[in-house]
Image: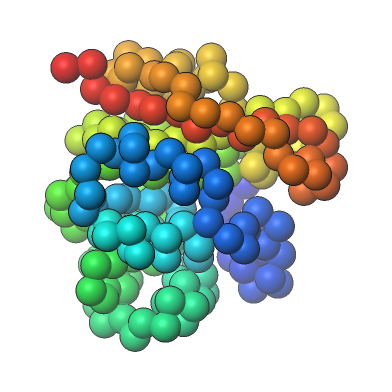
Amino acid sequence: MDSDFWHKRWQNNELGWHEGDVNGLLAAHFDDWASAGGQRVFLPLCGKTRDIAWLLSAGHRVAGIELSRAAVEQLFAELGVEPVISRHGDLEHFQAEGIDIFAGDLFELSAQALGPLDVVYDRAALVALPDGMRDRYSAYLMELTGRAPQFLLCFEYDQREMDGPPFSVTGDEVRRHYGEHYDVQLIASREVDGGLKGICAATEIAWSLQSPD
């Protein structure tokens, strides 16, 4: 799976993964988990998720990166916000009050460009990547964010019934990627209403990744 796959999905409006409303697990549990208001929250591979509007309305600041420029343009249009656009190397930086979104390759984003942050909200990144890319992604994310705490959402389902994305990522795999550096705890889970993409039964799980220090 390469960048052309995602660019074509956005160009063709094939957005079966996009939720039209805020994620229920985020709305129910994030603020209790974060324990403090006004967090700067980083969303890798953020798309145009409605979760960003919810986080902003809850008083948080948002940073994110998304491969598709079209997705970033749609995000700001739906927020009703006109961004200031600048360049950071190969990335474009869309900035407005309380929000910074980079358009381009996640692996081109540096910690210096991203700036200080409090937590990571990974709703759509780990599960979007095939097995062979998840090791590289998780290692880079920890380096990029200084091992900031993560509110991580994953799906578990029988991949013989449906191939991803989103892919099935089990708790054992989460611990394999992150368990050496984080205390990994289950926050909550819920059955996906109507099945994942209407094809197969699936469970959505929220994980807490906190430094043991």
**Residue 142 is drawn in which quadrant?**
top left
x, y percent for residue 102: 34, 64
Looking at this view, is 42 or 138 the one in front?
42
Q: Residue at the location (42% across, 65% down)?
A: 53
Q: Is residue 159 left or right of residue 7?
A: right
Color encoding of the figure: rainbow
Residue situated in front as seen by the camera: 56 or 91: 56
As displayed, is residue 208 above or below residue 163?
A: above
Residue 69 pos. (x, y %): 46, 72
Task: State the count of labels.
Answer: 0
Place residue 145 in its image quadrant. Answer: top left
Up-down relation of residue 11 to residue 172 (above or below): below
Q: Position of residue 31 (x, y in %)?
A: 34, 43
In this rendering, does residue 192 appear at all? Answer: yes
Q: Is residue 136 left or right of residue 58?
A: right
Q: Relative to the observer, which residue lies in front, 8 or 178?
A: 178
Q: Residue at x 79, y 33 (%)?
A: 201
When the figure is inspected, residue 154 is found, relative to residue 56, above or below; the finding is: above
Residue 91 appears in the rendering: no
Which residue lies at the image location 41% right of the left edge and 19% below the top edge?
Answer: 185
- Tell me the residue at 53%/14% (across/down): 172
Specify the quadrant that holds the C terminus: top left
Of residues 183 and 125, the one drawn nearer to the viewer in this rendering: 183
Residue 154 relative to residue 195: left or right: left
